[in-house]
Image (cartoon, grey):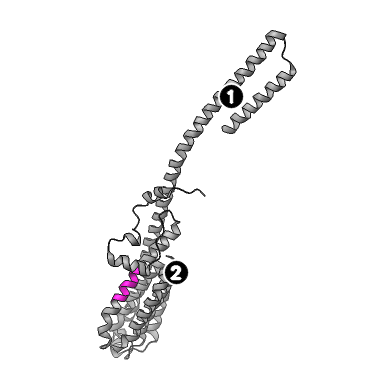
């Protein structure tokens, strides 16, 4: 495989995000050093650079979740029912930090995905009075794990997450104990199906749109990389072609001189002796054959 000078590729990929050491914000620089994968040179393989990009995104998501956990600590005393969910988020974030730092971005993404789903589902299923219309926003919050899946995992995995969310919503609405207010709502014609259709439709729409967005971005990055490589190949091929043309011209002159010398020598023998000896013909033929072979190799 052809290797290109690192400075050329660095210049071609100058629009990439800066390494952690060159991050202008001091807080992000410190956080990337603590939780994000180590930066790779711009000449690295596309998969390695994509892993670093996803790792930085996972580091930012972890930072945001930890900030939310810190801000929600005063509410723990007022709402004991959310304590397990907050504790689960905090523990999973702390477990995902070393995984992401070591480059296991997919494992960190799966941990975050499962953590968010368990936290939201746990808050819905552990409601003391049963399922209430006040908990409907929880069904819509499930799309946050879809965004994490499409960003940190293979993009197609978002459809599996959306399908799992849809099944959970349908089963929860069907099987969980309901409050009196919920029972009054579902007895109204058409309300029951609208309660289910809204969250499920949102899951499918977010999955489809986010998949198209992430997939198109990956294709665009691969096209840019292919264009950079082709431009470098053209730049490398230009000097090579010039040198090859120079060598071909020099060899043509050498062959022409050799043919002229052989012809002149044969003419001298013809003028002096009236014929050309066979040993001279064989020697001249061998030299002429070697000259032709050399010219053919150059071309």
Mark 1 or 2, which is nearer the eye? 1
Q: What residue does disc 1 label?
A: 255
Magenta residue span: 59-67
- Determine if the magenta segment contains residue 66: yes
* In contact (CB < 8 Å): disc 1 and disc 2: no
Helix, strand or loop at mark 1: helix
Helix, strand or loop at mark 2: loop
How far is the residue under mark 1 from the one under mark 2?
63 Å
Q: Position of residue 180 (x, y in %)?
A: 29, 90
Residue 147, quarter of picture: bottom left
Quarter occupied by the C terminus: top right
In the displayed structure, 16 sits above or below 186; it is: above
Q: What residue does disc 2 label?
A: 104
Q: Position of residue 80 (x, y in %)?
A: 30, 89
The residue positioned 57% from the left and 32% from the top of the image is 298
The residue positioned 61% from the left and 18% from the top of the image is 261
Residue 239, quarter of picture: top left
Near mark 2 (Cα within 10 A), the count class, few <14, some 14-19 or many ≥20, is some
């Amino acid at each position: 495989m052809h290797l290109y000078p690192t400075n050329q590729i660095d210049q071609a990929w100058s629009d990439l995000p800066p390494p952690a050491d060159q991050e202008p914000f001091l807080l992000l620089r410190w956080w990337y050093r603590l939780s994000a994968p180590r930066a790779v040179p711009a000449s690295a393989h596309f998969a390695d650079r994509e892993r670093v990009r996803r790792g930085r995104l996972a580091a930012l998501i972890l930072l945001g979740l930890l900030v939310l956990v810190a801000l929600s600590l005063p509410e723990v005393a007022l709402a004991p029912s959310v304590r397990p969910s907050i504790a689960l988020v905090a523990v999973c974030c702390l477990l995902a930090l070393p995984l992401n730092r070591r480059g296991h971005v997919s494992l960190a993404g799966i941990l975050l995905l499962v953590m968010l789903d368990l936290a939201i589902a746990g808050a819905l299923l552990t409601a003391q009075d049963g399922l209430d219309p006040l908990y409907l926003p929880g069904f819509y919050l499930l799309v946050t794990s879809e965004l994490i899946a499409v960003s940190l995992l293979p993009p197609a995995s978002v459809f599996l997450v959306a399908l799992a969310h849809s099944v959970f919503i349908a089963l929860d609405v069907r099987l969980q104990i309901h409050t009196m207010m919920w029972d009054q709502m579902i007895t109204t014609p058409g309300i029951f199906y609208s309660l289910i259709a809204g969250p499920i439709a949102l899951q499918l729409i977010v999955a489809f749109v986010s998949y198209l967005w992430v997939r198109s971005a990956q294709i665009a990055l691969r096209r840019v990389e292919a264009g950079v490589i082709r431009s470098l190949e053209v730049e490398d091929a230009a000097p090579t072609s010039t040198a090859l043309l120079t060598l071909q011209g020099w060899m043509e002159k050498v062959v022409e001189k050799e043919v002229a010398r052989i012809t002149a020598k044969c003419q001298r023998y013809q003028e002096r002796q009236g014929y050309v000896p066979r040993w001279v013909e064989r020697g001249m033929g061998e030299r002429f054959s070697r000259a032709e072979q050399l010219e053919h190799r150059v071309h």
